[in-house]
Image (spheres, rainbow, N blue to C red):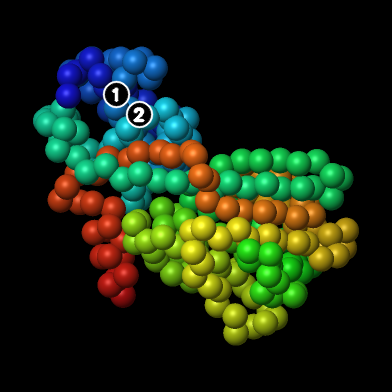
Amino acid sequence: MSKASLAFVSSDTADAKAAMESLSARYGQASQEDAEVVVALGGDGFLLQTLRDTMSTGKKVYGMNRGTIGFLMNEYRVGGLTERIAAAVAETIRPLEMLAVTHEGETVSALAINEVALWRQSYQTAKIRITVDEQVRIEELNCDGVMIATPAGSTAYNLSAHGPILPLDAPLLALTPVSPFRPRRWRGALLSNKATVRFDILEPEKRPVNAAADHTEVKAVASVTVRESLSATATLLFDPNHSWNERILAEQFRY
């Protein structure tokens, strides 16, 4: 790994900017177009944005934590960076594709590394029909919201909604409700990553629903179709002693 093949990017925080200045002075700064590896300095949110920016370019992203939680990040250290990157383990991520149709008939498509989520826009409970591979599975879910999460996103919003944690290499998606009212005992489902899920909004004028693919939000949707992308990929690098799968496994034994 040559110094010239690294591009450093940072979030807007003072710590992240200072880290980028220090690292680029030590290792050089390539353009993102010419770099083999993009080093993202910040928190998990900034890392996800960097992954979206480098989607399907073949570039690898190595994150170092200059944020708060940094679940997806490697430990920040200035020394030995080229050696760490050379020894890093690569994980390939396939995002979800969201196709949303609004109540006005507009069609919006977007990619999501973490999840596609729907939630009620007003004080009224959302009513949503859920279809999996063209078979209706729930005629009417009364809820605050519902989401489809990737293994990469299973420890984010999905986990806070009491959804399952998925190993990164699991060929699964998590379908998780948010505050389900009826059927009250439905806790969600594990689906094949080949599944296509459609959400139809019932009573959309009385009970409006918004949808978001990560941070791309669409207001007042009538239907949302979600499936794993067949073409788009992003590649994330982890130090071998602190792999993503190890973090996900450890997370399941926290109490």
The residue closer to the viewer here, 188 or 231, is: 231
Side of 145 where 230 appears, left or right: left
- Earlier sequence position, callout 2 versus callout 1: 1
Side of 194 where 91 appears, left or right: left
Residue position for label 1: 36
Q: Quadrant of the N terminus?
A: top left
In the rendered image, residue 173, in percent from the top left (x then y), is placed at 49, 61
Residue 70 visible in the current orientation? no
Q: Which mark is residue 59?
A: 2
In the rendered image, residue 247, in percent from the top left (x then y), is placed at 27, 58
Residue 92 visible in the current orientation? yes
Residue 79 lies, with reference to residue 201, above or below; the image says: above
Q: Quadrant of residue 17?
A: top left
Q: Which residue sits at x=45%, y=46%?
A: 94
Q: Quadrant of residue 107?
A: top right
Q: Which residue sits at x=17%, y=47%?
A: 240
Residue 208 lies, with reference to residue 39, above or below; the image says: below
Label 1 residue SS: loop
The answer to the question of whether label 2 and label 1 lie on touching residues, with beta carbons closer than 8 A, is yes
